[in-house]
Amino acid sequence: MSDSTERCWLVERTFDDRNLVTIVYATPDGSRYHQRERSAMSLQQGSAVTAATDIDTDELEMVSDEETRERYASEVERTAEKYDPDDPI
């Protein structure tokens, strides 16, 4: 585990047919992301998804697609303007 973290913002949340929720947090410039899968049940039982979280830089992956980078950067800006980092969304 690294000593360095970066503030990342929620940019995407999708649900699948296996009752899993995929949550994507991205850096403000949209160049790196972190993806998590959680069960929908765990989210209903109080494990809230927050607007932002600090993620270990070693756990961030590069976004290779320019369109996705731009979309993530735009979503970060929108989320950061509307919510405080610890707000559940």
Image (spheres, grey):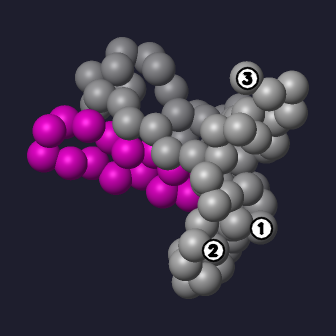
Mark sitting on residue 29: 1
Q: Quadrant of the N terminus?
A: top right
Q: Quadrant of the C terminus?
A: top right
In this orientation, does residue 73 appear? yes
Circle 2 sits in a helix, a strand or a loop, which is it? helix
The answer to whether residue 23 is magenta is: yes
Please, which residue is most extreme toward the bottom here? 67
Mark 3 → mark 1, Cα distance in angstroms: 23 Å
Q: Amino acid at mark 2?
A: Arg
Q: Amino acid at mark 1?
A: Asp
Looking at the image, do the residues carrying marks 2 and 1 touch, with CB atoms under 8 Å apart? yes
Type of secondary structure dominating the magenta stretch: strand
The answer to whether residue 83 is magenta is: no
Q: State the extent of the magenta-drawn residues as a range.
A: 10-25
Q: Amino acid at mark 3?
A: Met
The residue shown at (36%, 31%) is: 38
Looking at the picture, how far across and down is residue 66, in whole percent?
A: 61, 83
The residue shown at (13%, 46%) is: 17
Mark sitting on residue 9: none
Circle 3 sits in a helix, a strand or a loop, which is it? loop
Mark 2 → mark 1, Cα distance in angstroms: 7 Å
Work out whether residue 81 or residue 57 is closer to the camera in this orientation and state it: 57
Q: Which residue is mark 3?
A: 1
Work out whether residue 32 or residue 81 is closer to the camera in this orientation and state it: 32
Q: Which residue is mark 2?
A: 69
Of the two numbered discs 3 and 2 on the same chain, state the one appearing first in sequence.
3
Work out whether residue 78 or residue 72 is closer to the camera in this orientation and state it: 72
Vertical placement of residue 81 versus 86, above or below = below
The residue shown at (47%, 20%) is: 47
Of discs 3 and 1, which sits in the foreground? Answer: 3
Vertical placement of residue 15 versus 2, above or below = below
